[in-house]
Image (cartoon, rainbow, N blue to C red):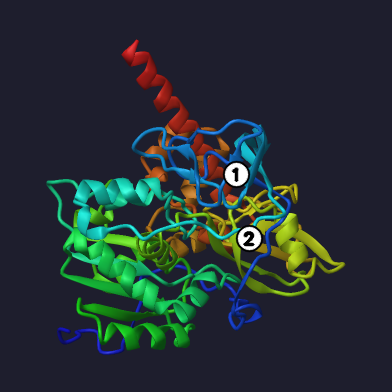
Amino acid sequence: MATSTYNGKTFTFKHGVHPEEFKDLSSHCAIQRMPFVEEYILPLGQHIGAPSTPLVTKGQKVARGQKIASPAGFVSVALHAPVDGEVSGIGLFANPSGQMVPGIKIRTDPYSTQKMAAVPVDLESLDNKGFINAVQEAGIVGLGGAAFPSHVKLAIPEDKKCDYIMLNGCECEPFLTADHRVMVEHPEEIIDGILILNKFIKARKAFIGIEVNKPDAIAALQKLAATSRFPVEVIQLAVKYPQGAEKMMITAILGKEVPHGKLPLDLGVLVANVGTVKAIADYFRLGQPLIERIVTVTGTAVKNPANILVPLGTPMKDVIAWSGGVTGDAARILLGGPMMGAVQKTLDTPVVKGTSGILILGNDLVKDITEYNCIRCGRCVEACPLYLNPSMMGLLAKKGRWEEMLDYHVLDCFECASCSYVCPSGIPLVQSFRVAKGILREKAAKEKTAGQS
């Protein structure tokens, strides 16, 4: 391996915030497998892009790992049965977004061993196009939370080149520890996943960025990286939120900023979550598509915090029950972490591909916040990792001046909520930006449609 220029130093980006971590609730908990439950609900749109198209009908028998929905375009992925069973319904079901969305319900076969008949994929028989198609057919998406179809990111355009593969092992959201446990317990699969990617990407080097609050993960991956036939370097990153955002990690490791309107690949960098790369290794080495994922169940109001390997489609209520249930002071449940997670209004919501955690908070951490007028303190500006002006955007949003927000680059905001976290006036800044972006995109779509008619 080439000589390192990092030499064990700690790197980071400017701005950001330092929320209390709460990692110790579950960081020591080894991954456990969730027992199979009676029914699974599988939304067809578990990823950014077009929802998958069903291939099954009500009453049809399905096998674990069988494709039950096909991609509905390039920015779409396949969906697979998490269990042997029978399709018990195709209709509208609860989704983490709070909406009722199209999905497939499967009733588990209680007599099945649930052993999947899968065979490894022959990498040597694939060219680049075949590799991209295989990743799409495996249903693999980014497991860090965004659920962006992985094959789209891996399809490097002819006019671009990937110099660096960068793995995100930061897991900077408070409470969550699923990625931490993946790195500690499955470092071999992560390194193997890098080698599989590089067979087709042909990068110069790989980096794995890990925050220094995960010393056991750093040690496990450094040990394997030292013996890798392809240069892999583990970079220690400061504990700061949102260190795991791909633009922030690129800045921390390479000292470069992704320009406005550009992507990491414009700097020759491909960023992937460590869990996503493990899923790629699982598919090509074991033949297992994305039918399960590791979920952290944690918080101050759950009886037994845990990191659990959960079949996709498992209702949240079953996962919580297997973790011992909630305590008497449970006040709020989120899918994801406290900064970017979505509050849930029903426990029937299923675990989906983007579910990194189930967070149950007690009354000690859930407070009613009174909103006051902006006092122009500038804390939100100091916190924003993208150097935006959340204060001004918040004022414009309050007045419904959506188009003017474009001049302040509201579409660049990736909704990390750092601004809302530090605001002493309790202004729900990130929520207003989310509304504004939705309105602006809807308006742009209507204008595009009108222009084509």
Q: What residue is rendered at 45% in x and 87% in y?
A: 215
**Looking at the image, how many numbered discs can be counted on the residues?**
2
Estimate the x, y position of residue 448 in percent, counting from the top left. 35, 21
Mark pair 2, 1: CA separation? 21 Å
In the picture, the quarter occupied by the C terminus is top left
> Could you say which disc has been placed on residue 113 in the image?
2
Q: Which residue is mark 1?
A: 42
Position above or below: 331 against 407: below
Residue 69 % position (x, y)? 49, 38
**In the displayed structure image, the side of residue 327 where residue 1 appears, left or right:** left
| Farthest left residue in view | 159
Q: Nearer the viewer, residue 233 or 37?
A: 37
What secondary structure is marked by label 2?
Answer: loop
| Identity, as a three-letter code, of the amino acid under mark 2 | Thr
* Vertical order, 31 against 134 (above or below): below
Q: Quadrant of the N terminus?
A: bottom left
Give the number of the mark in front: 2 or 1. Answer: 2
> Taking the image as drawn, is residue 257 in sight?
no
> Is 236 on the left-hand or right-hand side of 26?
left
